[in-house]
Image (cartoon, coloured by chain):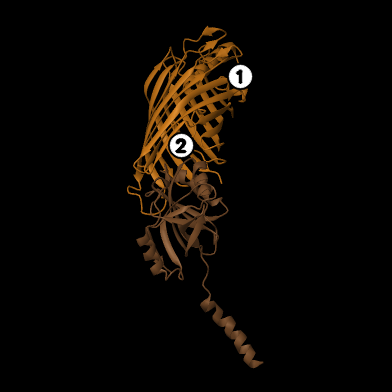
Chain colours: A brown, B orange
Amino acid sequence: MFKNLIIILGVFITTPMFYQPAFAEIQSVEMQVDGMTCPFCVYGIEKKLKALQEVTDASSNLKTGIVDIVLKEDAPLDIEKLNKAILESGFTPGKIKIKATGELTMHKLEGKQYHALKVTGTNQVFLLTLAPDHEKEEFLSAEKLKEMEKASEGGSKEIIITGYIHSHSVGVPPALSVESFEVN
Amino acid sequence: MNYIFKKCFIAVSVLSLFVLSIIPGNDLLSAPINSNVALPVRKGGFIFRSQARWLRATDDPTSSDKKLNAVAITNTLVYGVTPDLALFAIFPYIFRNVELTDPSSGKRIDKNDSGIGDLTLIGRYTIYAKDYPSGTARFAPLAGIKLPTGDDDLEPITTESVDLQFGGVSTITWDFGRHEVDADIIYRINTEAEDFEKGDDLFYDLAYEFRVYPWTLPDVGAPNFLYLVAEANGIFSQKSELNGKTIDNSGGSILFLSPGIQFATKRYILEASIQLPVIQDLNGNQVETDFVFTAGFRVNLP
């Protein structure tokens, strides 16, 4: 019995050492907002974003025109909702840059397979591209993909990708352009 | 009140109407202090603004030596119906002090009045907006109505008439909020009520704001701003009519130059300015304005 008690105590003592506090797998969201030129204007933007269910915080940078958005843990990123929030505050949404953790995967769309990132802890998928906007859509080159697969050891390790996202039509996952990546 | 005094009092009240046109507030949601602005109000958002405006007019060319002091506490509630459509409700409270010499007795008379001014409702709709990373350019026409809701004791500052106004406002900002220029023009149609009809007014404003603090934006955050403000605010007024007869001592034009200062945070703005008349071309014998001093605040309501 004494031995069992030691084991139970050991579990309680050591568990915090191994417990990694979870964080949103979309680690950062930076949204360009045009027309934002005074602190009084910024209030409306941040208020609208913070009212979204998925958002815990939003803070503006007047020098860069970028709003940093913090998503709730495991919350999916909805580009249309973010754009709508900015439009309803009276300003113009621009590009969105994110840093997301996930695993490389293949996504089937209309009979074709596309390289994608499945965000850890969510069902969110981003189609991987090289282009930051829809007009110049260009899917990953074989060389780039090979580099990422090698780094993630064939997909067995999580990969963190930083890049710009843009939405597609309904039913098609948004795209994430690979600006840079690192392995977790 | 004897007949002569009443006539004089009405006269000075009518005279004061001209300068008092600017008191209760044709001022809408202004980024500058005395001019209007076309910047957006978020959908479903409220902004509250309050200004205290003190007008002093003592330069009387007649022997009555009329002196007028008026203070209007002008409160404005703004609501963003959509990002393009904003509604304004302007409700002033006015204090008025008039001194004059009764021509019949030679006695000096000092009269005080106070009360609620007439309510003005205005809608502003943005029809052009172009946003840039470093600024914005916008234009918004507007239209409004003044309702006869004010205290009768303040007549003829308050009137029984329903008056209409329409115009437009434009705003340009650049260099990340370092510079802003606002311009507006508003025409007010004053209608007749109880045999009195104030002449129509044309308001025009041009404002320039220059951010002096911070001189350079920090790499992070949205810091508080300090602006220096320079405005030119003008009015053209037609002559008024009483009982169908034109009042010769009414109407004219006035142009103010208005330096000011403004401190802006995310949540509130504090501001003050003084309007100094550089041109006063008033019809007949009217009391000329010395200055209008304005101080106020506005707040983004949660």
Disc 1/disc 2 C-alpha distance (Å)? 33 Å
Q: Earlier in the sequence, mark 1 or mark 2?
A: 2
Task: Classify mark 2: helix, strand or loop.
Answer: loop
Count residues near mark 2 (Cα–Cα under 10 Å), then give few for <14, some for 14-19, many for 20+.
Answer: many
Q: Nearer the viewer, residue B287 or B270?
A: B270
Whether label 1 touches label 2, CB < 8 Å: no
* Residue B252 coordinates in the image, percent (x, y): 43, 16
The dot on residue B160 is: 1
Tell me which amino acid carries mark 1: Glu
Vertical side of A73 occupied by A66: above or below = above
The dot on residue B39 is: 2
The quarter of the rendered structure image containing the N terminus of chain B is top right
Closest to the camera, between mark 1 and mark 2, is: 2
Vertical side of A158 occupied by B223: above or below = above
* Residue B298 coordinates in the image, percent (x, y): 50, 40
Task: Classify mark 1: helix, strand or loop.
Answer: loop
In which chain is the residue bearing label 2? B
In which chain is the residue bearing label 1? B
Tell me which amino acid carries mark 2: Leu
Q: Residue at x 37, y 50 (%)?
A: A64
In this picture, residue A135 sits left or right of residue B200: left
